[in-house]
Image: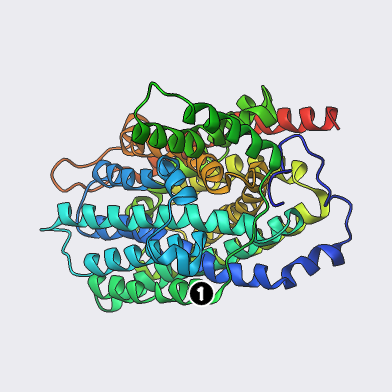
Amino acid sequence: MTGAEGTATSRPTEAGRSWRESLAIYAHRRVIGMAFLGFSAGLPFLLVFSTFHFWLARAGYTPDTIATMSLIGLTYSIKFLWSPFVDRLPIPILTRVMGRRRSWMLLAMIGIGLGLLGLSMTDPKTQLTLMVYLALLVAFSSATQDVALDAYRIEAVERFYQAAMAASYQFGYRVALFFAGAVALYLAGKFSWPFAYLCMAALTLVGIVTVLVIREPTVTRDSTAYLREERVLAFISRSRKMNRYLREVFAWVIGAVVCPFVDFAVRLGWLAIAVLLFVAVFRISDVMMQSMTSKVYVDLGFSEGEVAVVVKTFGIFMTLAGAFLGGLLVARHGIRTPLILAACMIAGTNLFFAWLAIAGHSVPVLAITICADNITGGLAGTVFIAYLSGLTSSNYTATQYALFSSLMTLPGKLLGSQSGKLAYWLGLEVDSVTNATLNPEAYSNFFIFVSCAGIPSILLAVYLFWRTKREG
């Protein structure tokens, strides 16, 4: 059974292992293969987010317009709405040939490639509406890929390897961010933005080839949850007052949508509320500030080359170091202590961006800021992915993980879409004619504010640590 036993109250069996044993988890073949799937997951993200925002900033759009475009990222936060279909609905021919998880991943990868190809044929100054629709196609396909890929990652190995799978996933994901960030910016500066997006579309072949090579995981269902679901469906099927076809549809919805949430609530009891609150606020300060960083770099006078080298290249190595460290910490000490550390680091590193805003165009300060932020991002990503994976049941892997990962980003995405207005409210001034930022140092107020937004996640992490330690 995979995932079914990883509740928030279970004892982390990995704690106390030696560093040598902890390192050995990275040699597992599934762990190695996850790096390529992580690349496929990471490739489209920046291309509809910060790289896309950089393109719009260069085209002359204002901070509030660019921040509003971050709403495209809401598709990642509401993917739980269609995750039951990915969990239960077969794709004609593909599912029979490839299996449930691989077929959905392949379909999503094709959608990503087509969307990026379409973006390579657009001009933001005259075709902004078309670009938004194409970006939505990429984001929707990417979110769907994430649902299937996360389920595959959890089901493919036993719980002990989940931290290593998360770290390997982060490795591939961050390498993809290097291509979607630094390489895309370099190509855009050297040639053109359409050419850069055309090259990114070609890189979707990495994921397509990988999903054709890997094997479909074998999953053992949780018998308790299975019997609970069967009793509910049997009761509905005996209802004679309902039309037969409507009864079948209703039974499917109950099994695919309602039962996953009931299963989670039954397993954790009242603690489920605290866990969901923690998931919702864990990355809130990090996600809130992401939609503004590209505009900050432009307003502080950093060139595409400087951003490509420091943020997109040096930053990638720092993130990989953080992801690797996160995997080791979870394997060595279990999940609880690294989770509190990650929550503190997420809130704290936003203060480095406040320092950068005051320092202005300083490459050394930018490098220190990116070092702190990206090590934190890699570590927190690995630790939190492992934590969320342990919350799922093997009966509803895709649906439950999609709920958790969506909840993780939804509050931040909603608040992030208003980050431009928040920056104005906190003192940022923009010329109404040229749209030039008059006092970029005022961004420091914004980053201090979003740093404070991370305090609730620290408090909840400590509370969950105390509850799980008390219950043994």
Q: Residue at x 51, y 46 (%)?
A: 355
What number of labels is visible? Answer: 1
| Up/down of 393 relative to 316, above or below | above
Q: Is mark 1 on a helix, strand or loop?
A: helix
Position of 371 compared to 268: left or right?
Answer: left
Q: Where is residue 369 in the image (x, y as percent from the top left)?
A: 54, 54
The one of 71 and 248 positioned closer to us in this rendering: 248
Q: Which residue is drawn at 33% across and 76% down?
A: 199
The chosen color scheme is rainbow
Question: Residue at the left extreme?
Answer: 126
Report if residue 455 is visible in the image: no
Of the 4 image quadrants, the one containing the C terminus is: top right
Can you tell which quarter of the image residue 215 is in? bottom right
Q: Where is residue 381 in the image (x, y as percent from the top left)?
A: 60, 52
Q: Which residue is drawn at 61% across and 63% down?
A: 217
The one of 161 and 156 positioned closer to us in this rendering: 156
| Up/down of 163 relative to 209, above or below | above
Q: How crowded is mark 1: few (under 14 residues within 10 Å), some or many (20 or more)?
A: some
Position of 421 compared to 267: left or right?
Answer: left
Q: Which residue is drawn at 32% across and 47% down?
A: 72
Residue underneath mark 1: 210
Q: Where is residue 353 in the image (x, y as percent from the top left)?
A: 49, 47
